[in-house]
């Protein structure tokens, strides 16, 4: 699609902030006004539109897609979004370790255990660890506490956390990104610890590296969206 606008601006409107293209407000894929609660978030959305050249690249709108998902899908039913997120706690990658005699186990302990322990301390929960691939259910009290914590997130934050949890296969990592001064690149390294370990062990190929780079970019974008959504 050819670029059909000249000026990209951000305007304060009833209910928040909205990106304007030549003075006309953006709408979501579902047709609702794309109004976001924070100016910082609107500026991220505006930057995507401003960065387009003569031909619009539909792949370059990670922020827009997250905002649309928050407005069209999450806001009407936040409980459903939270239920999806809780599944990432039930099978959190950080809880599943290699056998203790493996070198990978020691690496997992060094990188993952501090993150899991921090979640437990911060949220007042207990997460079961497992060696091997056998499933072990998490305590219902833990899941209930995490549901309550996520219930305090607005729809835009929930949309970002869902993307982060999906990419990391871990609610622990996604919730860590929401913390002040989060080391987002380090958290992505933790999320891909096993994949990088296997790549170092068995070798790397260009296609796999491209996929990892694309997923990393998506993770970092969702982290920026989350930080803007939670900015005061």
Image (cartoon, rainbow, N blue to C red):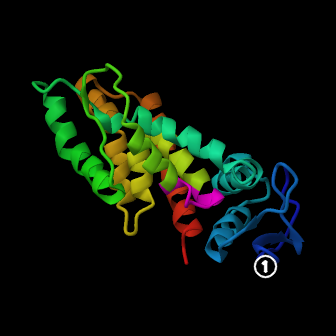
Q: Over which residues does the magenta segment extend?
A: 149-157
Q: Residue 24's image quarter?
A: bottom right
Q: Position of residue 165 (x, y in %)?
A: 48, 43
Residue 156 lies in quadrant: bottom right
When the figure is inspected, residue 192 is found, relative to residue 136, above or below; the finding is below
Q: Is residue 57 above or below residue 131?
A: below
Q: How many marks?
A: 1
Q: Residue at x 50, y 40 (%)?
A: 86
Q: Is residue 51 something one can see in this rendering?
A: yes
The residue where tag 1 is placed is 11
Image point (69%, 64%), residue name: 45
The question of residue 150 being in magenta is answered with yes
Residue 154's x, y, as percent? 61, 61
Q: Residue at x 69, y 57 (%)?
A: 67
> Looking at this view, is 225 or 32 the one in front?
32
Q: Name, please, the residue furthest toward the left.
A: 101
Left or right: residue 96 compared with residue 110: right
Which of these two is toward me, 127 or 28? Answer: 127
Residue 108 shown left or right of residue 29 in the figure: left
Q: Residue at x 34, y 25 (%)?
A: 136
Position above or below: 102 against 168: above
Which SS class for mark 1? strand
Q: Is residue 217 visible?
A: no
Q: Residues within 10 Å of mark 1 (few under 14, many from 20)?
A: some
Which residue sits furthest front?
Answer: 141
Left or right placement of residue 191 versus residue 22 in this view: left
Q: Which quarter of the rendering shows the C terminus? A: bottom right
Q: Is residue 170 magenta?
A: no
Residue 44 at x, y = what percent? 63, 67
Question: Picture coordinates of residue 1 (x, y %)?
Answer: 84, 49
Extreme top residue here?
A: 134
């Amino acid at each position: 699609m050819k670029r059909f606008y000249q000026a990209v601006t951000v305007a304060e409107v009833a209910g928040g902030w909205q990106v304007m293209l030549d003075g006309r407000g953006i709408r979501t894929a579902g047709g609702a006004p794309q109004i976001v609660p924070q100016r910082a978030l609107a500026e991220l959305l505006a930057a995507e539109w401003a960065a387009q050249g003569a031909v619009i690249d539909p792949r370059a709108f990670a922020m827009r897609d997250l905002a649309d998902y928050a407005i069209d899908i999450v806001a009407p039913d936040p409980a459903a979004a939270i239920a999806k997120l809780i599944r990432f706690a039930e099978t959190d990658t950080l809880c599943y370790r290699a056998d203790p005699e493996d070198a990978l186990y020691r690496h997992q302990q060094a990188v993952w255990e501090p993150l899991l322990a921090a979640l437990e301390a911060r949220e007042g929960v207990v997460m079961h660890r497992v060696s091997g691939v056998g499933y072990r259910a998490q305590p219902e009290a833990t899941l209930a506490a995490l549901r309550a914590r996520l219930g305090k997130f607005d729809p835009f934050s929930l949309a970002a956390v869902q993307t982060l949890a999906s990419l990391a296969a871990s609610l622990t990592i996604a919730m860590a990104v929401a913390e002040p001064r989060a080391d987002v690149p380090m958290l992505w390294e933790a999320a891909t610890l096993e994949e990088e370990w296997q790549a170092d062990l068995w070798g790397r190929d260009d296609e796999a590296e491209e996929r990892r780079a694309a997923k990393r970019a998506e993770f970092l974008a969702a982290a920026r969206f989350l930080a803007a959504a939670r900015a005061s």
